[in-house]
Image (tube, coloured by chain):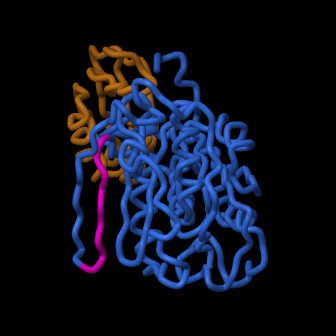
Chain colours: A orange, B blue
């Protein structure tokens, strides 16, 4: 599905809407290591724009967005940033 | 926190309940986890303590201690929002526990139905990470300050009077303490009598909510705390002022050569509890 992209974790959140699509994606990527790739499967169209935008805002790299059906998208995000730890 | 330590799995309800926190880049899932693991103790479940506890419970602070040995009276209800009319006569600590635990089942409220003294304070506050002073009298204020300095506990101190309030966050060893600001309690004659000590109810809400904000910032280690600065707010002018407070090297409790090495029980001269 991701062609040449090696996926480390897949999060199927079809049926979820904003902002929980990003909340769940963010919780998933927080638990991953730098450089790993998260595949997010969505069926809520606004989330296809919002999740990648929010991921980039938080310093992650959106590698690709594939539409695989009339209402199904796969978003591939690479973890590029670890949240700054203050204490 | 290293990867392996991030073991907490949020329940479905927690994902929804804390979603607006998790969305914040400065909080996220790991920040919310820190909040859930935090232990905060409130000195007093009155005008200040009520909103502090309310917002900390909403935020998901996992353990909230409530120190109060008073009972709810009808004259409290103009400002002490943790309580309500049906709780008149109930211990304030129990009333606050019911309010906070009903708001959020993730929160465990531990009640301490005692008046703080030099004998019991160390034992009570020892197990908490952060202390919030919402007391209504100088003896307790100084006792709490000194105990927090001695135990190196973060203390969010506040006071209100009529239309005004002040807040300062004390990080012992890093910034000034309350005694750096006011070395000794005022003499009894300088303190307004109970009859003079009116308070606009919402002032306790504003100042208490600022205290809760300082607590959550301290838990998350984000932003700039009121360390070394006293925040003054006046409701009538709607003015905020921040006054720099230097650390006093001669401070009797947190200075270079402290002279106060044991806790002091000052005389209570007006409890202002009504």
Residue displayed at 43% across by 77% down: B202
- The location of residue B4, given as percent across then percent down, is 53, 16
Picture mark count: 0
* Quadrant occupied by the C terminus of chain B: bottom right
Task: Give the image location of residue B74, x and y in percent.
Answer: 66, 85
The stretch drawn in magenta includes residue B229:
yes
Region rendered in magenta: B228-236
Percent across and percent down for residue B13 are: 59, 51
Residue B160 position by quadrant: bottom left
Q: Position of residue B41 (x, y in %)?
A: 61, 48
Seen at 40% across and 45% down, the residue is B169
Relative to the observer, which residue lies in front, B49 or B243? B243
Residue in the image at 63% along x and 49% along y: B64
Apparent side of residue A42 relative to residue B120 in the rendered image (left or right):
left
Camera-side residue of A18 and B195: B195
In front: A59, or B26?
B26
Residue in the picture at 33% in, 36% down: B248
Please indicate, yes or no, whether residue A15 appears anywhere in the rendered image: no
Tell me if residue B273 can be seen.
Answer: yes
Residue A58 part of the magenta-drawn span: no
Task: Indicate whether B91 appears above or below B135.
Answer: below
The overriding secondary structure of the stretch rendered in magenta is strand
Which of the 4 quarters of the picture holds residue B120? Answer: top right
């Amino acid at each position: 599905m991701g062609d040449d992209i090696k996926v480390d974790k897949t999060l199927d959140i079809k049926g979820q809407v904003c902002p929980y699509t990003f909340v769940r994606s963010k919780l998933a990527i927080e638990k991953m290591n730098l450089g790993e790739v998260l595949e997010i499967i969505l069926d809520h169209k606004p989330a296809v724009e919002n999740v990648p935008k929010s991921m980039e805002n938080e310093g992650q790299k959106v590698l690709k967005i594939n539409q695989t059906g009339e209402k199904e998208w796969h978003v591939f995000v690479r973890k590029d940033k670890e949240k700054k730890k203050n204490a | 926190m290293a990867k392996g330590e991030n073991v907490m799995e949020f329940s479905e309800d927690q994902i929804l309940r804390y979603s607006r926190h998790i969305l914040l880049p400065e909080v996220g899932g790991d920040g919310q986890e820190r909040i859930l693991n935090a232990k905060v103790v409130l000195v007093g479940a009155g005008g200040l303590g009520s909103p502090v506890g309310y917002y900390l419970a909403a935020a998901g602070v996992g353990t909230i201690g409530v120190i109060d040995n008073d009972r709810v009276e009808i004259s409290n209800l103009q400002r002490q929002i943790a309580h309500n009319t049906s709780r008149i006569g109930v211990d304030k600590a129990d009333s606050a526990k019911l309010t906070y635990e009903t708001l959020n089942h993730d929160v465990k409220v531990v009640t301490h139905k005692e008046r703080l003294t030099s004998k019991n304070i160390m034992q009570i506050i020892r197990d908490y990470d952060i202390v919030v002073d919402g007391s209504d009298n100088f003896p307790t204020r100084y006792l709490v300050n000194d105990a927090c300095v001695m135990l190196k506990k973060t203390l969010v101190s506040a006071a209100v009077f009529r239309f005004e309030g002040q807040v300062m966050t004390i990080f012992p060893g890093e910034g000034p303490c309350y005694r750096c600001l006011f070395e000794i309690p005022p003499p009894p004659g300088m303190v307004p009598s109970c009859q003079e000590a009116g308070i606009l109810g919402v002032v306790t809400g504003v100042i208490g909510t600022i205290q809760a904000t300082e607590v959550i910032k301290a838990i998350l280690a984000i932003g700039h705390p009121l360390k070394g600065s006293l925040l003054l707010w006046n409701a009538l002018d709607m003015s905020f002022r921040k006054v720099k407070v230097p650390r006093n090297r001669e401070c009797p409790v947190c200075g270079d050569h402290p002279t106060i090495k044991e806790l002091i029980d000052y005389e209570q001269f007006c409890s202002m509890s009504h």
